[in-house]
């Protein structure tokens, strides 16, 4: 009775210890799960980023279907892994695809979704990206008022996450829209603000591009001095960076600027510099523009017509791509105008016909107006006043058409704006419907939270029970495995003992047989040999007169002496043969095969190969070879822990070669101290003029190569 409280206390502590162990195991399990989740999340984020990069790359190449495919894949991954920022970025990429397909409503719908996601996560950088994307799509569709509104929204975001560089880019984009609208003062104002925000990096590509854009705005507003100032400033930076493409563009801009100013020599100089760089860059489309500019400059006021024609011919050789027909039409029209100015009417008419043929279905009223004007001038030069008058009337109509076309463009822009407003209203309505649906879904989610809580509690309880069950299962499995390993170890020890016992029996048998035959040899030599010698001695002691008295008796005597001598010689020969070869019937090949079979067990596979020992009868050498082999195999059994053993014995013209190879743990030959067995083996080999080489490696096992000469 006195031991009962102690037993209860012990049981209590065991239960406490077990509960603590389960809690620790659960904590480890949760930590491991968290690490696994983090690693998976990082890998997924990396996958999504890679898909976004590929989508942007395809978009730059105008491979829209591939871009859309990668963007939607990224969006699916982002939704599955609950990454809203990545999903919003995917939607922005999809907007460019829908815009290319002329599905502006779809483009702005996905942008609206992207904006909602970015606002829900307070990702101000993402919101800025949405507004900039909207503005860019509005600008590409000539909806400039909407583009201005979106850029203004982007500038209104006040958050520390928005960098000065990002604000500078927005100001520059806004200035581009004002330039398109012809509101040059506001364009200049925003370009200047972009420069101020980016003053920390005065040599960046964005800053230099802003200098070029300021030059363009001042050139359009006829402020040539400031235009030249900013062009030169941008040019100096590009020359520092050795950006030949941009340098060629600026030379062309300066050439156009001085052309407008009437400074033809400077204009020609810059046009030629631009062409030289474009020729080095092999930019054919840019060269066509440059050649046309120089041709126009040379043809003006009939300055140098041959050179003008030369540049027009150069341009016609380089014309390729989508604008080939329209560019060739321009070239032929320029030639027609130049021939007309030189009063070469036939050539002018020929070039004009080519221009008319190439300009069909172009639908450009400005070009048609200029075409009709040249036709009128050619008809007048030919003296065909009626035709000249008709062309002049057509020219005036086209002037009105150009004016009307401009009005139509304005009307179309207003219609586009109204359509966009209608689409925006439709999108807003869809967004309200979506918000209502989300509210209903939110209420359902709240109602299900309690149920989820119970389910989570049950799941945690099941997990704990599962962990406990797994723990006991593993404990039982481990105990079972230990028992099996112990059983295998004992069986292996028993087998090794059996093998050692078999080897000891073989050695004892050989030793006993040797000893027995040695005793027989001694008995033959010492006893029987002595007896025969004694018989011969006594037989010779007979009286010679008696023995030789009769001829027959003499012959018997001599025959008997001969038999005794023969018997003595035979006994002596047998005795010597036993000394020299005490086990004449020992068969080395059979002994090795029997030995290999006894050594092999379920843990050790033995492969035995024997060549040339079928008729080998040198028993003394055979015993030595057998004992050397025994010693080598014993070492494998005791130390190698091998699963395979290979024994290869070959008799050749020089002697016998033994190779014993195992796949055990091996050892370092230089550091390993050899035991008594190997030392005795080496002594035996020295006595037989033999050699032994050991090659062992801890990674692959041991190879022992023994050579024994046979004299």
Image (cartoon, rainbow, N blue to C red):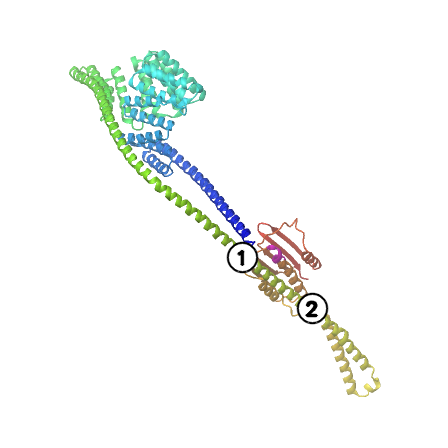
User: Left of 210 or right of it: where is 696?
Assistant: right
Q: Is residue 554 above or below residue 430?
A: below
Secondary structure at numbered mark 1: helix
Q: In this view, does 522 lie above or below 47?
A: below
* Prevailing secondary structure of the magenta residues: helix
- Residue projecting furthest to the front: 1
Specify whether residue 367 is in view.
Answer: yes
Q: Where is residue 529 in the image (x, y as percent from the top left)?
A: 76, 75
Work out which quarter of the rendered image holds the C terminus and state it: bottom right
- Residue projecting furthest to the left: 386
Nearest-to-viewer mark from 2 and 1 = 1
Region rendered in magenta: 635-640
State the residue position of label 1. 483
Q: In this view, does 382 lie above or below 563?
A: above
Question: Quadrant of the rendered structure where residue 202 is?
Answer: top left
Work out which quarter of the rendered image holds the N terminus and state it: bottom right
Q: Nearer the viewer, residue 4 or 158?
A: 4
State the residue position of label 2. 514
Q: Badge 1: few (under 14), some or many (20 or more) residues near its Cα, within 10 Å?
A: few
User: Left of 266 or right of it: where is 327?
Assistant: left
Q: Position of residue 478 (x, y in %)?
A: 51, 53
């Amino acid at each position: 009775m006195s031991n009962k409280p102690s037993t209860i206390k012990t049981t209590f502590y065991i239960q406490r210890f077990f509960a603590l162990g389960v809690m620790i195991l659960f904590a480890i399990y949760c930590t491991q799960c968290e690490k696994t989740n983090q690693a998976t999340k990082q890998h997924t984020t990396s996958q999504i980023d890679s898909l976004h990069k590929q989508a942007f790359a395809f978009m730059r190449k105008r491979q829209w279907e591939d871009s859309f495919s990668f963007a939607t894949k990224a969006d699916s991954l982002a939704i599955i892994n609950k990454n809203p920022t990545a999903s919003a970025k995917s939607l922005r990429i999809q907007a460019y695809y829908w815009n290319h397909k002329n599905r502006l409503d779809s483009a702005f719908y996905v942008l609206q979704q992207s904006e909602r996601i970015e606002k829900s996560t307070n990702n101000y950088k993402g919101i800025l990206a949405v507004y900039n994307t909207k503005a860019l799509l509005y600008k590409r569709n000539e909806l400039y008022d909407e583009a201005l509104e979106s850029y203004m929204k982007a500038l209104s975001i006040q958050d520390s996450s928005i960098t000065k560089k990002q604000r500078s880019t927005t100001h520059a984009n806004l200035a581009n829209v004002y330039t398109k609208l012809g509101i040059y003062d506001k364009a200049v104002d925003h370009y200047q603000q972009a420069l101020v925000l980016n003053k920390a990096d005065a040599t960046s590509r964005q800053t230099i591009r802003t200098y070029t854009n300021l030059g363009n705005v001042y050139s359009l507003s006829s402020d040539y001095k400031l235009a030249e100032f900013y062009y030169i400033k941008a040019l100096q930076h590009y020359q520092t960076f050795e950006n030949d493409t941009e340098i060629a563009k600026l030379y062309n801009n300066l050439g156009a600027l001085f052309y407008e100013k009437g400074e033809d020599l400077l204009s020609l100089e810059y046009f030629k510099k631009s062409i030289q760089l474009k020729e080095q860059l092999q930019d054919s489309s840019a060269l066509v523009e440059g050649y046309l500019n120089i041709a126009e400059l040379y043809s003006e006021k009939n300055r140098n017509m041959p050179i003008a024609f030369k540049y027009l011919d150069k341009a016609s050789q380089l014309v390729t791509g989508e604008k080939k027909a329209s560019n060739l039409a321009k070239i032929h029209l320029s030639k027609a105008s130049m021939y007309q100015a030189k009063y070469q009417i036939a050539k002018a008419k020929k070039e004009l016909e080519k221009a008319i043929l190439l300009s069909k279905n172009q639908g450009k009223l400005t070009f048609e107006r200029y075409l009709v004007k040249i036709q009128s001038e050619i008809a007048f030069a030919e003296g065909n006043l009626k035709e000249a008058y008709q062309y002049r009337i057509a020219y005036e109509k086209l002037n009105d058409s150009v004016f009307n076309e401009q009005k139509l463009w304005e009307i179309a822009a207003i219609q586009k704006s109204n359509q966009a407003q209608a689409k925006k209203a439709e999108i807003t309505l869809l967004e309200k419907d979506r918000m209502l649906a989300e509210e209903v879904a939110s209420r359902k989610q709240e109602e299900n939270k309690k149920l989820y809580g119970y389910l989570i509690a049950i799941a945690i309880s099941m997990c704990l029970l599962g962990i406990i069950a797994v723990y006991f299962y593993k404990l039982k499995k481990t105990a079972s495995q230990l028992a099996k390993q112990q059983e295998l170890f004992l069986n292996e020890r028993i087998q090794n003992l059996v093998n050692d016992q078999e080897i000891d029996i073989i050695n004892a048998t050989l030793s006993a047989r040797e000893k027995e035959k040695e005793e027989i040899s001694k008995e033959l030599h010492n006893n029987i040999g002595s007896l025969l010698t004694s018989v011969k001695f006594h037989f010779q002691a007979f009286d010679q007169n008696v023995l030789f008295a009769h001829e027959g008796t003499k012959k018997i005597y001599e025959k008997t002496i001969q038999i005794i001598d023969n018997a003595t010689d035979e006994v002596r020969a047998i005795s010597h043969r036993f000394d020299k070869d005490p086990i004449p019937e020992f068969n080395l090949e059979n002994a090795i095969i029997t030995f290999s079979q006894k050594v092999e067990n379920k843990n050790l596979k033995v492969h035995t190969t024997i060549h040339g020992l079928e008729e080998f009868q040198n028993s003394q050498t055979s015993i030595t070879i057998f004992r050397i082999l025994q010693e080598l195999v014993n070492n494998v059994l005791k130390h190698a822990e091998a699963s395979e053993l290979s024994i290869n014995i070959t008799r050749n013209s020089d002697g016998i070669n033994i190779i014993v190879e195992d796949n055990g743990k091996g050892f370092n030959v230089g550091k390993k101290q050899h035991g008594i067995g190997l030392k005795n083996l080496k002594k035996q080999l020295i006595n037989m003029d033999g050699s032994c080489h050991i090659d062992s490696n801890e990674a692959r096992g041991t190879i022992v190569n023994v050579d024994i000469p046979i004299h």
